[in-house]
Amino acid sequence: MNGHIQALGGTDSSRAWFDRAQESLAGGISSSSRLTSTGPHPYPLYMVSGSGARIRDVDGNEYVDYLLSYGSAVLGHAHPELTEALTAVLRTGTMFGTCNTPEVELAELICDMVPGAELVRFANSGSEAVQGAVRAARGYTGRSKILKFEGHYHGWSDTLAISNRPGAPEAGPYAAPHAVPHSPGIPAGIVDDVVVCPWNDAVALRALLDAHRGELAAVICEPIVANNACTMPAPGYLDLLREECTARGIVLIFDEVCTGFRTGPGGAQALFGVVPDLAVYSKALGGGLPIAAFAGQRHVMEPLAQGHVKHGGTYNASPLCATSALVSLRHLNQPGVTKRIDESGRRLMEAIRRAAHDRRIPCSVQGVGAMFQTVFTADGTPTRQYRDLLHTDQARYHAFRHELLKRGIHTNAYGMACWFVAATVTEDDLDATCEAVTEAFGVL
C-alpha cells in the first residue's frame, strides 16, 4: 500500500484498527497478500460479517464480494446449511487427532468427482498440499528437480516460491528464465532444484525438458493461471504437457487450488480434458475452512500408501474441516450449481467488455466465468505468459478497482489476481455490479 489513492470515505474505523494492528502484528497483517489485495488504498478494510455474496466492514459499509476469501467462500458467506453442519460438529468435538468418518466420505467424493483421483491425502492449505505432491513425485521418480512456469504461484513455502513475480531485470532470458527466489530466506540449494519455463511456449518447454533430461521429478502448473490475471492455456498446450511428461517419465501436477471444483465438479482437468498424475486442491474445497488435498493416480500415490514417502499433520482433515468440505462439494457436485456460477461470471465479463468498448478503453477480460480478470493491455489482447503482465497499465487497473470499491463492489486490488464469483450471487448483486462497472469506466 502506498497511499497514492485517496482513502475510501466512511472507513475511519478500519484506519484505526490498522493503526492498532501495527503495534502487535508484523506489518499490521497476518498474511502478506492482505497488503496486495488492498492495493494502493492506504489501509486494509476490516470486515466483520457476511451473508451470501455480500460482506460488511467495521464501519457498516456493505459490498458485493468478488475477493470471496480468495475464492474459498464459493458458497458465499454464512451459508445456512454449512453453518448448521459446522455447529453440529462444534457440539460433538472438532478434532481428535485420530481417523474420522468424514475424511473417508470426503476422499470417496473427490475420487468420484475428479477424473484423475484414485487416492487422496489431506492437508491444511494449498502450500502444504503442494509440498506433499512434490514430495510424492520425488519419492515416486527418485529425482529431485521440478519444472515450474514463470509467474505461476504454488504457495509461500520454500519448495516452489520461485519466480512467482520476478522483475524484468532479474528474470533472465525469456526462453530460459532464471530461478528467482520470491523472498529472502529461501536457501540457494532449493532454488537450484527448480527449473523455470515460460508459459504457453512449446519450443521453450521442449528445450528445457531436453536440457534436464533424466533430472525432473515433476512439471507443475496452474492450468488457468489465477495468479497471472487468469491467463488461459493456449489451445493444445495442456495436452502437450501431458504428452511430454508421459514420454519422459515425469509426473505432471496440476495446481488446482483456484480452479478445483469452482470451474466444474471435475475442475480444470475435466474442463480441458487433460488428466494429470497429481492435482492439488484447497480454497473452494473447504468452503471457507482450512483444508487442502493432493490427489492422483494410484501408482504415483502408492509410495505414500505404503509409508515409504512420509506425510503428516495434526490438523489434517479434522472432523470440522472435513465436514465443511463435504457440504461444499456436495453442493458443487449438484447439476447446475457451477453452471450458474459460470453464467453469472460471464455476464459480468460481458458487462466489462461492453463498458470498455463504449469508452474506447483497450482491455482484455480473460479467464472463465467462475474466475476472471480485467487486464489493461495496450491493444486489448489477452496475456499469454507472465512477462506480458509487466507491460499492462496497472495504474488504470487500480483506478478501476477503486471506483468499483466506492460503489460497493469489493474485488482484489492486485492486478495479477482475479475475480471469484459466489454460488449465492443474486440478480440484484449482478445488476449492482454491472451498473458500477459502467459508471467506473465512465470516469477512467
Image (cartoon, rainbow, N blue to C red):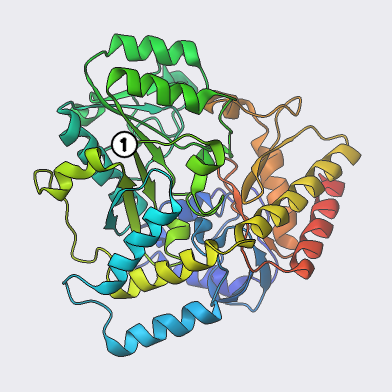
Name the foreground residue: 155 vs 28: 155
In this rendering, would 254 be left or right of 58? left
Instruction: Note whether residue 102 is visible.
Output: yes
Q: Which residue is drawn at 57% across and 27% down?
A: 390
Instruction: Note whether residue 173 is visible.
Output: no
Q: Which residue is drawn at 58% across and 33% down?
A: 232
Q: Which residue is drawn at 57% across and 75% down?
A: 13
Q: Position of residue 62 (x, y in %)?
A: 67, 73
Q: Position of residue 192 (x, y in %)?
A: 23, 23
Q: Position of residue 136 (x, y in %)?
A: 21, 40
- Which amino acid, mark 1? Leu
Q: Quadrant of residue 105?
A: bottom left
Name the residue carrying label 1: 160
In this rendering, would 409 be left or right of 112? right
Local SS, label 1: loop
Above or below for 19 versus 181: below
Above or below for 13 versus 341: below
